[in-house]
Image (tube, rainbow, N blue to C red):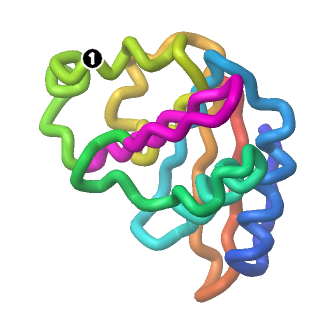
Amino acid sequence: MDIFISNSEQDTINFAKDFAKNLKKGDIVVLTGELGCGKTKFTQGILSYFGLENEISSPTFTIVNEHHKENISIFHFDVYRLEDIDEFYAMGGEEYFEKGICIIEWGEQIEEILPKGYTKITFSKLDDNKRELKIEKM
């Protein structure tokens, strides 16, 4: 497990940009932590690395936002509002896993169906601006 301490939203975005350098098609990144702890800012950093920084929005009401550029597709999920895993299956969610990079906010809700080898990042608030990010390979 690795730990990163972010002192600001910009720190989180910059760390995510650096993290994104190693992402490739088929990678799954689960972002977990309480509301307002930086999950969407982290996603913004990943999208920025791929030149998609103007595309960020939380998919809270749509479940998934799709972002496409040249040779990469990024699927940004927010599964907070899912009632159960069956709802994820019903929307064909698992079909996205091999199509591109999947970033899943609140992904702990569907961890039991994720393929092995995904990355889990747990966000914790240390104070108003400071966050701890624990990065684990699952």
Q: Indicate left or right for 135 with 43 as reference.
A: right
- The amino acid beneath tag 1 is Gly
Place of residue 99 in the rendered image (x, y in percent of width and height, measured from the top left): 53, 15
Residue at point 22%, 54% (across, down): 61
Residue receiving disc 1: 92
Residue at point 58%, 73% (across, down): 125
Place of residue 64 in the rendered image (x, y in percent of width and height, measured from the top left): 35, 40
Picture quarter with the C terminus: top right
Question: Splitting the image into 4 quarters, where does residue 79 fall?
Answer: top left
Does the magenta portion include 84?
Answer: no
Picture quarter with the N terminus: top right
* Crowd around label 1: few <14 · some 14–19 · many ≥20 (10 Å): few
Place of residue 121 in the rendered image (x, y in percent of width and height, measured from the top left): 63, 45
- Using the image, determine if residue 100 lies above or below residue 125: above
Choose between 89 and 49: the one closer to the eye: 49
Q: Indicate left or right for 23 with 117 as reference.
A: right
Prevalent SS, magenta region = strand
Magenta residues, start to end = 65-80
Does the magenta portion include 77?
Answer: yes
- Using the image, determine if residue 125 lies above or below residue 21: below
